[in-house]
Structure formats: C-alpha cells, structure tokens
Amino acid sequence: LEVWDKVISEFPTEQKAIFKSIKDCIADKAAFKRHGYRLGSTDLVRMSPLLRSLSDPAVEALADQFVSMVIRPGTELVSKGKRERALYVLLAGNVYIEEGKRRVDY
C-alpha cells in the first residue's frame, strides 16, 4: 500500500487513468486465463453465438470497437425506456432481467 500511496501522491491528476489502466490489464489477463484469448481478439468476438457467423472483415471491425469492462456484481447495465448505443457481450458471470417483482436469470 505504501507504494500505491506514493504513486497516487506523485500523480494526483492521473488517478482515474491509472485505475483504468489497471482494470484494463486485469480484464485482459482474466480473459486470457479463462478463455485463452486476449481482449480485442477476433477469437474472443467469435465466442458469442450471435456474432460467430459474421464474416472475417466484420468480426475484425467489431473487435476494434469493443471496450473491455469489469463490472461489479449488482451493477445495472441497462434500464427500461433508456436508449442505449451499446452491445454487451458477457464473457463470464451471470445477468438477469428484472421487471417489477418478476426476475429472469440468464
């Protein structure tokens, strides 16, 4: 912790960027450890049943656009009625849809 405190104290305005770099590195290592592919890999894109039938150029274009995210359990990704301009591809974990008292797990 002492080293971490020193880094943050020397670069206080860079704290957000430092955290993002660490999260990206951890996400990449986790993807490689779990699936054998690096983030941004076309093989990782092809893991999705929805995307695996796309042409190689389409998959390559998509892989360049993907942004890795590590999401904490319980984080709301989308909300009913809110327009999103994103496609979430889940590599690990579970998601559920909740409407009122009804919940459907995936």
Image: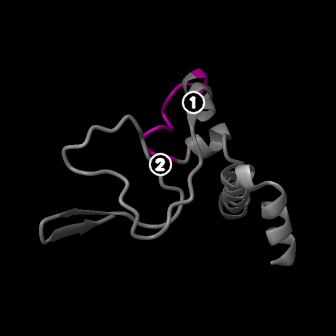
Q: Which mark is residue 89?
A: 2
Q: Residue at x 23, y 66 (%)?
A: 104
**Camera-side residue of 71 and 36:** 71
The answer to which image quadrant residue 45 occupies is: top right
Is residue 36 visible in the rendered image? The answer is: no
In this rendering, position of residue 80 left or right of residue 8: left
> Which image quadrant: the N terminus?
bottom right
Q: Residue furthest bottom?
A: 1
Q: Position of residue 30 (x, y in %)?
A: 68, 62
Label count reads: 2
Magenta-colored span: 48-57
- On residue 79, which mark appears? none
| Residue 96 appears in the picture as rendered | yes
The residue identified by callout 1 is: 59
Q: Amino acid at mark 2?
A: Val
* Residue 46 spot, x, y in % from top left: 56, 41
Q: In front here: 58 or 40? A: 40
Comparing 67 with 104, the one in front is 67
Q: Is residue 66 above or below residue 29?
A: above
User: Relative to 44, does residue 28 appear above or below in the rendering?
Assistant: below
